[in-house]
Every structure is written in C-alpha cells, then in structure tokens.
Amino acid sequence: LNGMSRSCDCEVFLDPSFEYCCIPFSLYGGTRTNTLSSQPSEHTGANFRFTIYSSSKVTVERRSREFINDMVSVSALHRELFRTRCTKRYTLGPKSLLMCVYGNGCIYFMAINSSPNHFLQLRLVVKHGKGVIDAFGRSGETHHDIQPNTEKILLVLCSDGKLNIECVEFSYATAMIFCTSKGASMQRKTTFRIGGDMAISTAGGLLSGVVDPEGSCQSGSDTLDLQRCSKID
C-alpha cells in the first residue's frame, strides 16, 4: 500500500538450496513518453541492478508478467484495504458503497455492490494537483459498471516521488438497473487484473449490507485531506 520513492535499496541474506523471486516495479516503467506528433511515442524504462556476493554460482532468470497470475493476490489486496484505518465511505445506492482508502502514499477508490439484483453504473470524476500520477486506472471523468454481488478497485493514485499528495477532489453520480442476475460468474481465470470484478467478500458484504436496500441512487462530492489522514495512520 506504500507510495513511490525516488530510489530504493534492499539488502537480503539468502539461504542456500532455495529459489527466490524478486519483483522490482516502477510506476513510470512501461509508460509512454511525450514525443512530437510526427513520431510515435516510446515506452520508458526503469533501471535496477543486482549485486550478488556468493562463493558459488548464482543464476538469475528474467520473467515478465503483464498480468497477475490469479485473483489470490488481488483478493489479498482487497482484504488489506478493508483493514486500513484511514478510510471514507459514501453511499451509492441500495447496498452499494464507494470507498476511498489512504494507504501511506497511495489513494485507492473502490466500489462495492452487494445487491443481488441491481447493476450499478457509476460516474466518477477525480481531480488532483501536481505530483500525483495514476498508478492504476485513469483520473478525470470515468464511467464504471459494477455487477451485482461484486467489488472492484476503480482507481489508484500515487505520489510521483517528488511531492506529497495533499488533497484530492472528487465527485460521483450513480444509476441502478434492476436485473435478474444472481451476480457475476466468478470462474477461475489464468490472468486477472487489479481492477477485475471480485466476488463480494465477507468484509465488503458487511460494510455495504447496512445500506438501505430500498434506498435511492446517490450523488455527491468531497475533498480528501491527506495530511489529516497521515496523522491518523
């Protein structure tokens, strides 16, 4: 849940006869650079270096992954977000919530729809100042569809490593469509994105279950004061 730093050094001692996995990542790596309109944009790189001290040969193999292998890691992230103290919740409609979670450098926007027979349509507008980048999803005006009995991460904002995130303004509007579906079919997939539809969790069901199932659709706006949130954590 941590944000981004300008650089990071890590030193570990590895026991023999084991295989280890190191996952370096960068929010800038893989993004497209701005170029002249007459030239195609290029992907940026993120450099990292291994320095290994060993009396015997150590083999390092490269593995690339665009997707997370399965939904286990995403489910673990959802559980961690539900446990985070600095969280604000907004009612969207019958048994539906919008969660804004501040995770020590990152801001997560998450939608929960525990209604078994309402399809949620959400219009989300997020505005932020300099020093903030979109780690996942897209800020500005976006539209999201949340199926019955599902929860999903909509947007993740992060500091660019130069400036701290001070405040984020956002607004939302919703519409509910009655349907006869029993919820999304959560078949096990070989690949799964961080913003994929997850079957409603126990924590998500408990939080959204207290919302009036006969309530109307809601709209609203707010400003997240992250300086105050950091003091809570």
Image: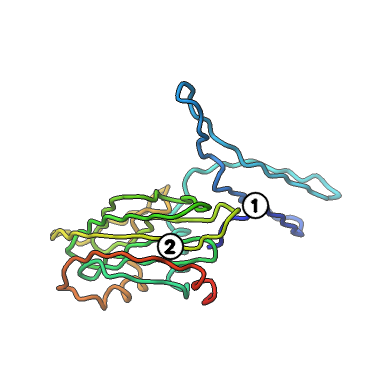
Instruction: Say what amino acid the circle numbered 2 marks.
Output: Ser
Q: Quick one: which residue is furthest to the front in this view? A: 129
| Quarter location, residue 98 | bottom left
Against 50, is 40 above or below?
Answer: above
Residue count near mark 2 (Cα–Cα under 10 Å), binned few <14, some 14–19, many ≥20 = some
Q: Nearer the viewer, residue 40 or 10?
A: 40
Residue at coordinates 52% horizontally, 69% vertically from top-left? 227
Q: Mark 1: which secondary structure? A: loop
Residue at coordinates 35% horizontally, 73% vertically from top-left? 202
Counting from the top left corner in percent of width and height, residue 192 is at 41, 50
Counting from the top left corner in percent of width and height, residue 92 is at 25, 66
Q: CA distance from mark 2 to mark 1?
A: 28 Å
Against 126, is 64 above or below?
Answer: above
- Find residue 75 and name its label: 2
Left or right: 137 in relation to 149: right
Residue count near mark 1 (Cα–Cα under 10 Å), binned few <14, some 14–19, many ≥20 = few
Q: Which is more N-terminal, label 1 or label 2? A: 1
Left or right: 199 in relation to 177: right
The residue where tag 1 is placed is: 6
Q: Quick one: which residue is furthest to the top in this view? A: 38
Q: Quadrant of the C terminus?
A: bottom right
Which color scheme did the rendering employ for the protein?
rainbow
Counting from the top left corner in percent of width and height, residue 28 is at 55, 44
Left or right: 3 in relation to 13: left
- Find residue 230 and name its label: none
Q: Nearer the viewer, residue 132 or 80?
A: 132
